[in-house]
Image (cartoon, grey):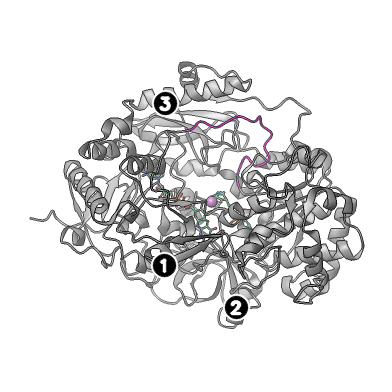
Amino acid sequence: MFDIKPHAAHWGYFEALVKGGRLIGARGFEQDPYPASLLDSTADAVHSPVRIDQPYIRRGWLQGRRRGAARGGEPFVPVSWDRVTRILAEETARTRAEHGDTSIFAGSYGWSSAGRYHHAKSQLQRFLGQGGGFTSSVHSYSYAAAQTLLPHVLGTNEVLLGRVTDWHAIARYARVMVCFGGLAAKNGLVSSGGAGRHDCRLLMQRAKQAGVRFVNISPFQGDTEAELAAEWIPIRPGTDTAMMLAMAHVLIDSHRYDEGYLNRCTTGFEKLRDYVMGDAEDATPKTPEWAEPITGVPAQRIRQLVLEMTVNPAMLTAAWSLQRAEHGEQPYWMLVALAAMLGTIGKPGLGVAFGYGSINGMGTPRRELPAIAGPAIRNPVGLSIPVARITELLERPGEVLEFNGQQIALPDIRLVWWAGGNPFHHHQDLNRLQRAWSRPETIVVQEPWWTSLARHADIVLPATTTLERNDIASSSRDRFVGAMHQAIKPLAKARNDVDMLADIADALGYRDRFTEQRDERAWLRFMYERWRQQCAGLGFEAPDFDRFWKVGHVEVPEPPNGQEYTQFADFAADPDEAPLNTPSGKIELFSATIAGFRYADCPGHPVWIEPREWLKAPLAKAYPLHLLTVQPATRLHGQLDTGRVSAADKIDGREPILLNPEDAKARALEDGMVVRVFNARGACLAGLRLAPGQMRGVAAMATGAWFNPEVPGQPGSLCIHGNPNVLTADIGTSSLGQGPSAQSCLVQVERWDGPLPPISVHEPPAFAPPLP
Ligand SMILES: Nc1nc2c(c(=O)[nH]1)N[C@H]1C(S)=C(S)[C@@H](COP(=O)(O)OP(=O)(O)OC[C@H]3O[C@@H](n4cnc5c(=O)[nH]c(N)nc54)[C@H](O)[C@@H]3O)O[C@H]1N2
Ligand SMILES: Nc1nc2c(c(=O)[nH]1)N[C@H]1C(S)=C(S)[C@@H](COP(=O)(O)OP(=O)(O)OC[C@H]3O[C@@H](n4cnc5c(=O)[nH]c(N)nc54)[C@H](O)[C@@H]3O)O[C@H]1N2
Ligand SMILES: [Mo]
């Protein structure tokens, strides 16, 4: 009938069903209680009509139109692998010789695929690192602001990335879990590096059954599943810090905070207290009555909730989305401060941690073991930008960027090379990016699909998908390791990223250094056996490689019953014996280091600073809706957008926009209509979906519908498909974190009576015959 091969993706482990050389389906892993619906799109994506069949070069690039070219609108000329390999070797060598190694940008941010050996970005960076180096990027779009802030405050990022206090501990000890931004179950569909079991939903249900009450503080009621029966407190987007400050005010005013804990475990409380109580420069007490008109949350509700938290043991959490906003550092710092005032950080099952509802595996009980690592990357150049400042990098060569106390001199980028990520998906203000994108001389992209990024490249290299090669899936957040067996032959002329790079390295004289003289199978065996040895040292005996490969996975057993994990427990038990990795060894509610940077947009303790775009901003007169651009339930970012699950959710082929029925009525809009969403930065079409659970004044669109400008190559053109990043603001969260601020975005919505142009981005782009 059909062949069955074990395989894995970020959206889960599965069995690939193969017939006649084609992938015909994907069946969820037998141990997975909630296999992701996204599996249904896997085969559509692999055999999609927008697979790139062979190498291509933009015609204008071949004709010498390079710096200043309007990319995205010109046809592509087919070229052979031999020719493109030679051109890339020459182009890399020439760029290095004429402009230096820093003129090559290969931060190449993105999720790539789950396999750790064929991880496209890692292989690209290894290749360019060995060739002399490149300008890179640091941190993640997911949580860049927090990644910069939290080491100053808690001395670690573990509270953000995991291993965090686990659900067993929460179920046993917490009685209320207060969730800013909810615990959106859709986000648990994925985990970077693959999810063996999707168990986040199950673990939340168990906590509920054990008696934990959930509170969802969010503009969207649907941010917790109905089965959790959470209380919903609607809040204006971007204002959580104000609510938290008011909660702190109540604690101080009623003397209900844990003074002993603050003395023992924190530093700088007095400064924060003065600010909260109105004794600081701004002379404004941050009372619940002060917070009510900002947040839209009744003062009485704020008061009751925080007083409940002094009686019922509380776990506090916030979604990662809160810090992908202007001043996104502030709600995170203030939530840590609140937990410290309650004296709970490090107490069994209590305290604070981030992202329990942001990805599968946060809080899943597991043993402390490493994930399988791919080949090591070395970059001799050592220059990195904060990841979300890509447009500025291209716009402002020679200028200086403030970042976490450093001044980064921006290099002059001549060559951009991307593999396994998609800035035309992930970056904000795509029209601005598109203008800046004209500045490099050459843009190289390795991709399996004609994504919007591939369409805006000069040199396009067709990559295989994971189904066309062997690999190993592994995630630091998962108990499983997965064998990814090759299921089908490479389609058309697609090649593995590592093989195309090895050939270019060969032309440049360093193939053996790049491959380390191992082939695919030798690498997988090497990576696996190295991991097996590390595990043995930590008391876990994994099977040998051959056995693992045959069985298809390894499961690391759960910790024995009763062994729940609480983060910061050692510290809370004895802060002198087990100090934090901060300058004071304690939780820094005031940071002298941050204060020393003298950033007006991120002073030495948590504060409320109005963002430029929120519902009470002057700009809201013109653009009265706050647009949240959330993670898609039907895709992984831009991946799988061509699949049936994503297609079934669209309205007339356009990405849905969720609006409160009253907001729709006020604009004479009806469910299912196509609308135009716009602001001064751009505009897109979307399909209207009425959502009573969406707070008034707040709209939501998922990211990931492929950017489809009506006129390709023309910045500012209407996106006819519904990519919300034509609307979002490209500003750093602050001079400290310089993270992305996608959630700070005001828009207006109106009906669209114009024609409905067909979606062209799901078809291949225009081609031109080879040049004479
Ligand atoms: N407005 C707004 N924007 C956002 C966000 C938001 O909340 N709002 N969220 C941000 C966040 S948190 C993130 S993480 C980013 C995600 O941004 P990205 O990670 O850049 O998005 P993906 O679509 O997953 O891009 C991965 C690309 O790798 C390609 N790929 C997959 N496998 C392979 C392979 O084997 N080889 C090669 N060469 N390529 C491969 C895929 O086809 C895909 O195009 O988006 C960010 N953007
Ligand atoms: N299915 C699926 N799951 C995914 C992904 C995917 O592409 N598809 N992407 C993964 C990635 S890369 C990441 S980083 C995580 C991101 O995980 P999150 O950042 O947690 O995800 P979001 O969906 O952006 O936001 C969660 C909720 O926060 C609420 N929210 C937004 N702004 C505010 C605010 O100002 N205040 C409050 N209180 N609430 C707010 C929104 O209503 C939204 O539904 O998701 C991961 N999970
Ligand atoms: Mo992310």
Question: Which of pointers 2 and 1 indicates the residue nearer the eye?
Answer: 1
Q: Out of 467 and 338, give the one closest to the viewer.
A: 338
Q: Which mark is residue 161?
A: none
Q: Residue at (82%, 74%) from the top-left corner? A: 289
Q: Which mark is residue 624?
A: 2
Task: Kindly indicate the quadrant of the structure image that contains residue 747.
Answer: bottom right
**Total residue callouts:** 3
The x and y percentages for residue 503 are: 24, 37
Left or right: where 313 falls relative to 482: right
Q: Which residues are magenta?
A: 359-373
| Mark pair 3, 1: CA separation | 43 Å
Question: Which of pointers 2 and 3 indicates the residue nearer the eye?
Answer: 3
Q: Earlier in the sequence, mark 3 or mark 1?
A: 1
| Mark pair 2, 1: CA separation | 35 Å
Task: Kindly indicate the quadrant of the structure image that contains residue 396.
Answer: bottom left
Secondary structure at badge 1 equals loop
Task: Kindly indicate the quadrant of the structure image that contains residue 688.
Answer: bottom right
> Circle 3 is placed at which residue position?
524
Secondary structure at badge 3 equals helix
The x and y percentages for residue 713 are: 30, 67
Residue 491 visible within the image: no
